[in-house]
Amino acid sequence: QVQLVESGGGLVQPGGSLRLSCAASGFTFSLYDMSWYRQAPGKERELVAEIFWVDSTTTYLNSVEGRFTISRDNAKNTVYLQMNSLKPEDTAVYYCYRRTGDYWGQGTQVLVSS
C-alpha cells in the first residue's frame, strides 16, 4: 500500500533553515509527481511546491519562491523540501502528497519562532 512518511520538522528561529523529507513506499516513486502542502492554524491547506516526475521541473507558492527548494531522489524514494530564510508565517503542518490517488502523509510540524 502507498505510504508517505514525513520527517524533519521542528522549532527554528526566524531566518533559520530546515529540510523536510518524505519517504515513499508501496509504489514506483519515480513515475509520480510529488508535492508539499502546508496548513497553518485556522487556514486552508495550500500547495507549497510540486516536482514533476517526467523532467523534475518544479513550481512554488509565490510566498516561498526563492527560499524553498523541492527536490527528489528516486534512488531513495524520497522527496525533500529545503526551507531557508524561514519566517513566522511559514509556521504550519507540512504534508507530503501524491496527487494521483490522493495520498497524504501524516504531516510534520514546523514552528518558526524566536
Image (cartoon, rainbow, N blue to C red):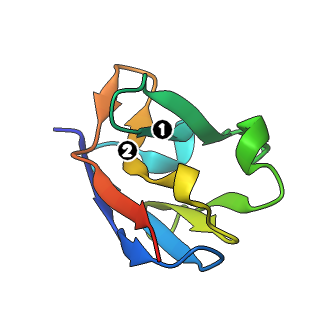
Mark 2 and mark 1 in contact (Cβ < 8 Å)?
Answer: yes
The first of marks 1 and 2 along the sequence is 1
Direction from residue 41 to residue 44 in the image, left or right: right
Quadrant in which the N terminus is drawn:
top left
Seen in the image, is 45 located left or right of residue 58? left
Look at 46% across and 24% down and name the residue there.
99
| Residue at image mark 1 | 37
Q: CA distance from mark 1 to mark 2?
A: 5 Å
Residue annotated with mark 2:
95
92 with respect to 35 (left or right): left
- Extreme residue toward the front, this view: 114
Looking at the rendered structure, the secondary structure element under dot 2 is: strand
The residue located at (31%, 58%) in the rendering is 109
Q: Quadrant of residue 59?
A: top right
Q: Residues within 10 Å of mark 1 (few under 14, many from 20)?
A: some
Residue 69 position (above or below residue 94):
below
Q: Quadrant of residue 50?
A: top right
Residue drawn where x is 62% and y is 66% of the image: 86
Q: Position of residue 75 (x, y in %)?
A: 50, 69
Residue 43 seen in the figure: yes
Q: Nearer the viewer, residue 92 or 57?
A: 92
Given the current orientation, which residue lies at the most extreme right position? 66
